[in-house]
Image (tube, rainbow, N blue to C red):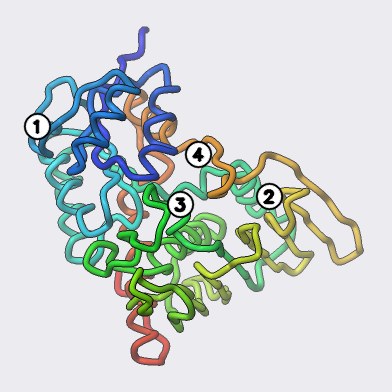
Amino acid sequence: METKTIGVAVLGCGAVAQRRHLPEYAANKNAKIEGIFDLNQERAAELAERYDCKVYHSLEEAIGDPAVDAVSVCVPNAYHAEYTIKALNAGKHVLVEKPMATSLEESAKIMEAWRKSGKVLMPDHNQRLVPAYKKAHELLQEGIIGDLLFFQCNFKHSGPEGWSIANSNDTWFFKEDQAGFGVMGDLGVHKVDLIRFLTNSEIKSVFAEELTLDKKFPNGEMINMDDNAICMFTMENGLPGIMHFSWTNYGGKEDNGSIIYGTKGVMKIYGDYEDDIVVEMRDGVQIKYSVGKISTNANQLKSGVIDEFVAAITEQRKPIVTGFDGHQALAVVIAAGESSKKGQWVDIQY
């Protein structure tokens, strides 16, 4: 049986669209880029010429195109909910960048539209699609390090200004009305989703401190959002852990490492960049697994997100990451902000 080609519209033409969504759709034999929409019509036209597709002049034109089966929502965070809900209501499958929304009220409206639509909704929580993390999940389920005792995760790089198309600190990531969150919503949301995946448990409570240490606007004033976040978590299964997220890691290499401690040993995932997973057992035995590098801002690799999204549509199944996962991760990000303001532990309100 021949697989139907999925017509796609990419909404927003910033860095993530240019470096991941567009090239990965173009490389997928079951997808066809029908058109691109961006408020910067000149940028959209340049990309449309490169990918041999249409330029849409409005969101309504894009989601109203009968050739479009699915959309990628790659606009700033503040517009994720609006674009996602309108696309779902128009009968389109949706891949939305993270975080899925900027409030739980918005997220609840997305979930309602998703349920009514019957379409695929996938937030771009890409870490659980990384081969090493998929392998780590498998090994943990097999009990390789015994009962889990503690986790420690980092996600730290030098900041989004070097990733953005403008390549400057005049980026929407630093503007609260467009981003909604600082580093916690940019990097933290990834590890929050990942630990849910690795441990098969939800996060119960959080104690967080969100800090602004170094990032500045072009005029030299400090940004009014966090560029570092330090979190302690307790999972619903009782597992405790800590995480550090940073936009001020100026050492050259990103730090995307995770360490899981168990009764039989320790699992280090991307603890160094020679071996993807290193398991160190209590008896001194060390086991190494090399299953693939992780993508970094400096070294872009295929994310697997586009292929999973397209496959979920063509195979008429749920994707590995669903709207439910987007909602749960967002709830933790919001609770972390509340905890930082109050200076106390906060239970997650899902």
Q: Nearer the viewer, mark 1 or mark 3?
A: 3
For the residues marked 3 and 2, what is the alpha-carbon distance in whole angstroms?
33 Å
Write down the residue under mark 1.
61
Counting residues from the N terminus, which is met first, the one under dot 4 or under dot 1?
A: 1
For the residues marked 2 and 4, what is the alpha-carbon distance in whole angstroms?
22 Å
Is 19 or 312 nearer to us in this picture? Answer: 19
- The percent coordinates of residue 270 (x first, y second) are 68, 55
The image shows residue 200, relative to residue 27, as above or below, that is below
Q: On the rendered structure, is 222 left or right of 176?
A: right
Q: On the rendered structure, is 264 left or right of 152?
A: right
Is 250 or 225 nearer to us in this picture? Answer: 250
Question: Mark 4: which amino acid?
Answer: Ser
Q: Are marks 2 and 4 in contact (CB under 8 Å)?
A: no
Write down the residue under mark 2.
139
Q: Nearer the viewer, mark 4 or mark 1?
A: 1
- Furthest residue in direction top, as rendered: 1
Write down the residue under mark 4.
303
Question: Mark 1: which amino acid?
Answer: Glu
Counting residues from the N terminus, which is met first, the one under dot 1 or under dot 3?
A: 1
The image shows residue 108, relative to residue 337, as above or below, that is above
Write down the residue under mark 3.
163
- The percent coordinates of residue 156 (x first, y second) are 56, 64
| Disc 2, SS | helix
The image shows residue 297, relative to residue 93, as above or below, that is below
| Disc 3, SS | loop
For the residues marked 4 and 3, what is the alpha-carbon distance in whole angstroms?
16 Å
What is the quadrant of residue 227 in the picture?
A: bottom left
Q: On the rendered structure, is 68 left or right of 150?
A: left
